[in-house]
């Protein structure tokens, strides 16, 4: 299958899932939005970008915004917690209480469409896409995923990759180790590190999403791209042998993680790798931004075990909620978020590649240059933990299964829970 075709297939299957789940999830329909008060010179942006690299990326956008819109006061409304595990609840309260921020971070795919678009909380952005010529600079697959019902609903600022194994090059060199490409190699490396008193795999799942994130890479590495995609359309059986195998592998991996994993965040886990206390972590490429912000130069990367040739993708986007108090300023923000200047300033420090196709690769570091090439040639699959593959309700159900699984390691119970979650999401019979 050609790459174009693969992207189209991904887009089409995502849209099919979206249609399927429209009725199933998300908050109740919005009340009629009240008319926004006369515009003040303010802009409130809501996100969960608080760690070093995340905040640095956001600040780059703010710098340009201030220059382009002098006199506008930016209200940086952040709620800490990786993957928005705390921010999303706050956002929901605000949106349902008719107190939306002017624009907010939301993942492309189900998180955007099921939670906020089909429920009537967002304004379409067709005029903006037209005036900015974005239909020509975003890939067709991306345009399809931010569309619903013939309209565009949010502006993608980046593409992140979830399935990366990050390792400390010095620790690996000192111990004559190579980054593992298979699960067997992973366990050999893990044993070698353990024998030296080094934590093999750093995990920070104070927000359980980090374990779900690890698990999605194990699912991909166990069953490959097509079967993994089938999990989200009902084509792949959650009761089947590959899911069982993935849970067994995950269980074994968890025996090699730091004992305090449930009290650490993803960036604190990465700090263990930076300090050489741990050898590896499996996390999204916001780790590249964390390393940059912390001045860590000894970082190595490889696809997570079994994930070579597969790009587990997600995208941060910004939209325009109905009733935004500073609509005009919000539109100027969205224009910046989708622009070449904005994306070229933001992404090199955020650890992501541009959603646009025309960014200058020379502005990016070595990891991101390699990611740009992989994005062009790999098979793209949607991330579970970051809103692309499944509705928020379904992701929450899987997170609940993971919460129990990381402590009790009960494979049969977890598999039954996962199968049930697919049924509840009305994707499986
Ligand atoms: C993801 C988000 C990234 C990054 C990460 C960790 O969900 O898309 O931009 O911030 O969470 O917080």
Image: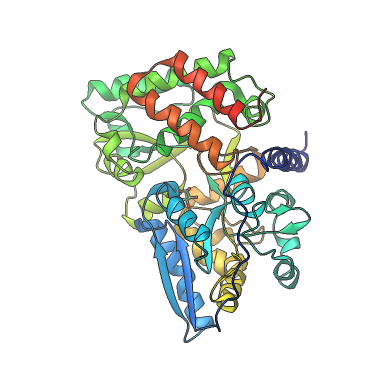
Q: Nearer the viewer, residue 93 or 375?
A: 93
Q: Residue at x 37, y 18 (%)?
A: 409
Extreme front residue here?
Answer: 31
Please identify the quarter of the rendering in which residue 225 is found.
Answer: top right
Q: Position of residue 239 (x, y in %)?
A: 58, 16
In this picture, is 148 found above or below 123?
above
Q: Position of residue 286 (x, y in %)?
A: 44, 49
Q: Residue at x 59, y 75 (%)?
A: 327
Q: Is residue 282 visible?
A: no
| Image quadrant occupied by the N terminus | top right
Please identify the quarter of the rendering in which residue 60 is found.
Answer: bottom left
Extreme left residue here?
Answer: 197
Please identify the quarter of the rendering in which residue 19 is found.
Answer: top right
**In the displayed structure, does residue 23 sit left or right of residue 169?**
right
Q: Nearer the viewer, residue 23 or 225?
A: 23
In this picture, is 185 found above or below 337?
above
Q: Is residue 334 visible?
A: yes
The structure's colour scheme is rainbow
In this picture, is 110 found above or below 335?
above
Q: Position of residue 365 (x, y in %)?
A: 47, 55
Q: Residue at x 49, y 83 (%)?
A: 41
Extreme bottom residue here?
Answer: 71
Q: Position of residue 429 (x, y in %)?
A: 67, 22
**In the displayed structure, does residue 231 sit left or right of residue 213?**
right
**In the displayed structure, does residue 268 sit left or right of residue 316?**
left
In this picture, is 300 found above or below 97?
above
Badge count: 0
């Amino acid at each position: 299958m050609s790459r174009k075709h693969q992207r189209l297939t991904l887009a089409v299957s995502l849209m099919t899932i979206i249609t399927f789940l429209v009725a199933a999830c998300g908050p109740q329909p919005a009340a009629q939005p009240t008319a926004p008060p006369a515009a003040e010179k303010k802009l409130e942006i809501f996100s969960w970008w608080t760690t070093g690299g995340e905040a640095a990326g956001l600040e780059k956008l703010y710098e340009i915004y201030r220059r382009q819109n002098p006199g506008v006061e930016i209200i940086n409304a952040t709620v800490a917690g990786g993957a928005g595990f705390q921010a999303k609840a706050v956002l929901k309260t605000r949106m349902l209480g008719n107190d939306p921020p002017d624009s907010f971070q939301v993942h492309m795919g189900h998180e955007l469409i099921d939670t906020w678009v089909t429920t009537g909380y967002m304004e379409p952005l067709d005029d903006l896409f037209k005036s900015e010529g974005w239909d020509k600079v975003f890939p067709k697959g991306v345009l399809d995923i931010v569309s619903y019902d013939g309209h565009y609903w949010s502006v993608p600022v980046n593409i992140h990759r979830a399935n990366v194994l990050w390792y400390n090059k010095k620790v690996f060199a000192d111990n004559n180790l190579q980054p593992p490409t298979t699960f067997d190699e992973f366990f050999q490396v893990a044993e070698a590190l353990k024998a030296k008193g080094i934590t093999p795999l750093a995990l920070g799942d104070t927000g359980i999403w980090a374990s779900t994130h690890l698990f999605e890479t194990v699912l991909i590495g166990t069953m490959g791209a097509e079967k993994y995609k089938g999990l989200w359309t009902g084509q792949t059986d959650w009761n089947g042998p590959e899911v069982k195998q993935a849970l067994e592998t995950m269980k074994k991996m968890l025996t090699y993680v730091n004992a305090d994993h449930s009290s650490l965040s993803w960036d604190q886990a990465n700090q263990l790798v930076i300090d050489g206390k741990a050898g590896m972590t499996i996390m999204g490429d916001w780790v590249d931004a964390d390393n940059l912000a912390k001045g860590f130069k000894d970082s190595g990367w490889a696809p997570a075990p079994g994930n070579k040739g597969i790009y587990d993708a997600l995208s941060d986007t910004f939209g325009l909620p109905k009733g935004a108090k500073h609509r005009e300023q919000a539109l100027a923000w969205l224009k910046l978020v989708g622009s070449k200047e904005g994306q070229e300033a933001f992404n090199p420090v955020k650890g992501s590649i541009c959603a646009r196709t025309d960014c200058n690769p020379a502005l990016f570091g070595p990891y991101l240059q390699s990611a740009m090439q992989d994005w062009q040639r790999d098979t793209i699959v949607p991330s579970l933990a970051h809103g692309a593959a499944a509705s928020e309700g379904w992701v929450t159900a899987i997170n609940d299964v993971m919460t129990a699984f990381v402590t009790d390691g009960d494979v049969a119970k977890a598999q039954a829970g996962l199968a049930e979650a697919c049924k509840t999401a009305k994707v499986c019979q």
